[in-house]
Amino acid sequence: MGLQHLTSLQSLSFAFCPNLKKVASHPQQLTSLHHLCFWDCPKMMDLPETLLPSLLRLKIRYNCPGLKERCSKNGSYWPLISHLPCIDIQEF
């Protein structure tokens, strides 16, 4: 809810959020969001699908197994993210 007023927000990262499961989105307010990153969010499973069309870069880093699986080429999110110019999925 607090992000909805940040209309010029271009980059958003979530790091070390052990209990984060879902990010609610308000696409009419976050139209400038182009970069989304998750780092060490082990319970995160769902991407904010309404924001995916405007993204240019999606990063999924260390310890996000659910997102890594769902965003892989055989995953359920692949049809929604395959258009992105930069998809960076790493597991250290």
Image (cartoon, rainbow, N blue to C red):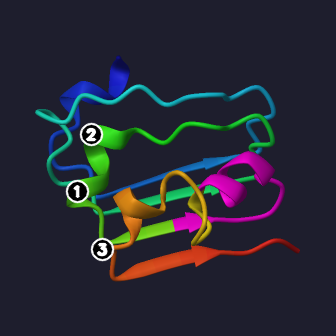
60 magenta-colored: yes
Q: For the view shown, which residue lies furthest in the right direction?
A: 92
Q: Residue 89 occupies which quadrant of the picture?
A: bottom right
What residue is shown at x 49% (from left), y 31% (from top)? 23
Tell me: 22 left or right of 58.
right
How many marks are shown on the rendered structure?
3
What residue is shown at x 71% (from left), y 57% (from top)? 69
The quadrant of the picture occupied by the C terminus is bottom right
Q: Which residue is mark 1?
A: 53
Choose the circle earlier in sequence order: 1 or 3. 1
Circle 1/circle 2 CB separation < 8 Å:
yes
The quadrant of the picture occupied by the N terminus is top left
Q: Is residue 21 above or below residue 71?
A: above
Marks 1/3: CA–CA distance: 8 Å
Q: Secondary structure at mark 1?
A: helix
Nearest to the observer: residue 14 or residue 58: 58
Circle 1/circle 3 CB separation < 8 Å:
yes
Q: Which residue is mark 3?
A: 83
State the extent of the magenta-drawn residues as a range.
59-70
